Image: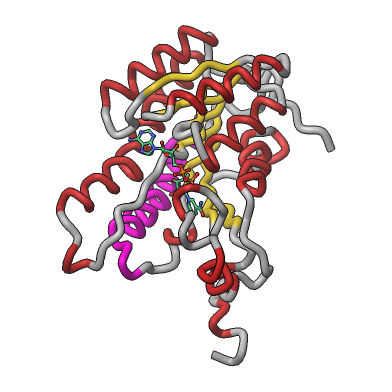
Amino acid sequence: MHISLEKQVALVTGASSGLGYASAKALAAAGAAVVVNYRSQAEPAEALVNEIREAGGQAVAIEADVSQEDAVDAMFAEAIDTFGALDILVANSGLQKDAAIADMTLDDWRTVLDVNLTGQFLCARAALRQFARQGPRPWVSRANGKIIHMSSVHQLIPWAGHVNYAASKGGVDLLMRSIAQEVGEQRIRVNGIAPGAIRTAINEQATQGEAARDLLRLIPYGRIGDPQDVANAVVWLASDLSDYVHGTTLFIDGGMSLYPEFRDNG
Ligand code: NAD
């Protein structure tokens, strides 16, 4: 089965590293023109753009802090200016500021909520406004726009020491499903991806050496994920092969959300 996103335009936030980087690259390989959003890491973002262009694709890097309304709106305006339309948003940017609840500062709380939840709201709103402005593009897709929210298994699994992160991802779940309920009749598809443990910068400590062995006990399928595992799902969710998938979160976690502690009878 061949997936083509030819003539479609995708914007991926936080695409200078990890899951965003792999997703942007995979979307470009499937034929989409790609906007590579980054916040501070211009170098890898530009390197990815060059790589995509050298392979015959189209890409542009745009700096923006997704938690800032003006910056998000300016990024979408520049993206539309560059490629003329938008078909796919991957709202991927996220971060952690971990602390025990008693030690968590208001700044730690706000920063994570601002980026992980408000950032997703601002980007989804900007994408939906553009989908409404441009109207149907049936020659590129059956849907009038597709939004993929990068969530986490922690939209479901409580996470001690990370209450800001878990609360933000729980919020992403209901943000995604509420938007899906609201815009479905406009033929706009909205879904989420909930990765488990995927080897990227966000969890570098937890996925190396001894810590990685501990982590594997939480993963029934027995391996830590690669960014490509998530990128493959992004491409599928962005394509018409998933045209009847709407308002769903796809868990890509090797079974981490299956309560593996109960494997031996609890
Ligand atoms: P990462 O740290 O490599 O990527 C996060 C990206 O978000 C970075 O590129 C960073 O620059 C960007 N970002 C942070 N603040 C930003 C801001 N204010 N504006 C714009 N961009 C900003 O880690 P990752 O694993 O690739 O994470 C990507 C997403 O996947 C995050 O939302 C994360 O919560 C989620 N996730 C990752 C895992 C995992 O195991 N790696 C598991 C569950 C969920």
Position of residue 180 measured from the top left corner of the image (x, y, whole percent): 47, 42
Give the residue at x 58% y 72%.
Answer: 213
| Residue 12 shown in magenta | no
Residue furthest to the front: 209
Residue 59, percent from left and from top: 58, 17
Q: Nearer the viewer, residue 162 or 73?
A: 162
Q: Nearer the viewer, residue 120 or 162?
A: 162
* Residue 237 shown left or right of residue 171 in the figure: right
Q: Which residue is drawn at 63% across and 41% down?
A: 231
Q: Left or right of 122: which side holds 186?
A: right
Residue 56 placement (x, y as % from top left): 72, 14
Q: Is residue 84 above or below residue 13?
A: above
Magenta segment: does it hold 181?
A: yes
Residue reaching furthest to the right: 1
* Prevailing SS of the magenta stretch: helix
The answer to whether residue 265 shows anywhere in this view is yes
Point out residue 53 in the picture as x, y percentages from the top left corner: 65, 15
Magenta residues, as a range?
160-186
State whether residue 175 is above or below residue 133.
below
Quadrant holding ligand 1?
A: top left
* Quarter containing the N terminus: top right
